[in-house]
Image (cartoon, rainbow, N blue to C red):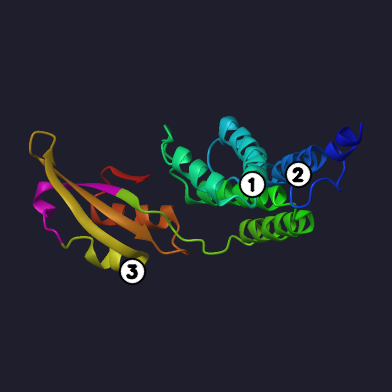
Amino acid sequence: MQQINNLFSFNGLEGQPTILMSIAAMALAAVLSLIITKVYISTFTGERYSQAFVHTIIMMSVVVSVVMNVVSGNAGVAFGLFAVFSLIRFRSAVTNAKDIAYIFFGLCVGMTAGLFQFELAIVLTVFASLIFYLLFKFDYGKGKDTQILKVTVPENLNHEDLFEDILGELTDFHQLRQVETTNLGTMILYTFAIRSKVNTKDQVLLDAIRERNANLKVSLSYL
């Protein structure tokens, strides 16, 4: 009976986590990871976020909290688990740098909860979530994405510097990528990689180029 009481007590063997403490760590990791995913969903700026990725953040946070229970104070087990995890390969590549930050965020919260630093885990979640939200709210570091500009010009207007002054004024970066003939050789198609200035409207850029290329086709696409 005494052993059962010690099992669910915070006063079990010194230095050894009890089941009750481990359950509390997992529960806290789950709750805090739910907050993390709420912030992720609220600040997501792509076309559609992955539900599987949201679930992964929660599960990783909970599982890592248990792993930290196991390796806490046991260097041999820690090295063994490190060797096992080194064999794991992720089958899907994470292409968004912000997604990597959220994965690391969930892992840190799980690790902190697994070490029974409950107050620190809560403070970390609140503070980092606030930082993520403020960066999103104020659109910090906003810049223009690289764009592909395709311009069709008549053959008699064919020279590479035809749009140099326009692109120099309205873009931060521009580079000629390809020149090809079209329409049975009567037209020339220029392909530029550009990055517009922050205050440059796409319509303004297109109108300026149309005035120079005899109002032929101009297309602007985002990578």
Sequence-wise, which precedes: disc 1 or disc 2?
2
Residue 20 appears at what percent x and percent y? 82, 39
Q: Which residue is mark 2?
A: 25
Q: Position of residue 84 (x, y in %)?
A: 46, 38
Disc marking residue 169: 3
Residue 127 image-quadrant placement: bottom right
Three-letter code, disc 1? Met
- For the residues bearing labels 1 and 2, Cβ distance under 8 angstroms: yes
Q: Residue at x 80, y 43 (%)?
A: 21
Q: Residue at x 63, y 62 (%)?
A: 138
Say if the magenta span includes residue 24: no
The answer for how far apart the CA atoms under marks 3 and 2 are is 57 Å
| Quadrant where the image shows the C terminus | top left
Residue wearing tag 1: 68
Q: SS of the residue at dot 1?
A: helix
Q: CA distance from mark 1 to mark 3?
A: 56 Å
Q: Nearer the viewer, residue 86 or 192?
A: 86
In this view of the protein, can residue 43 be seen by the observer?
no
**Residue 81 in the image: above or below residue 165:** above
Q: Residue at x 87, y 33 (%)?
A: 4
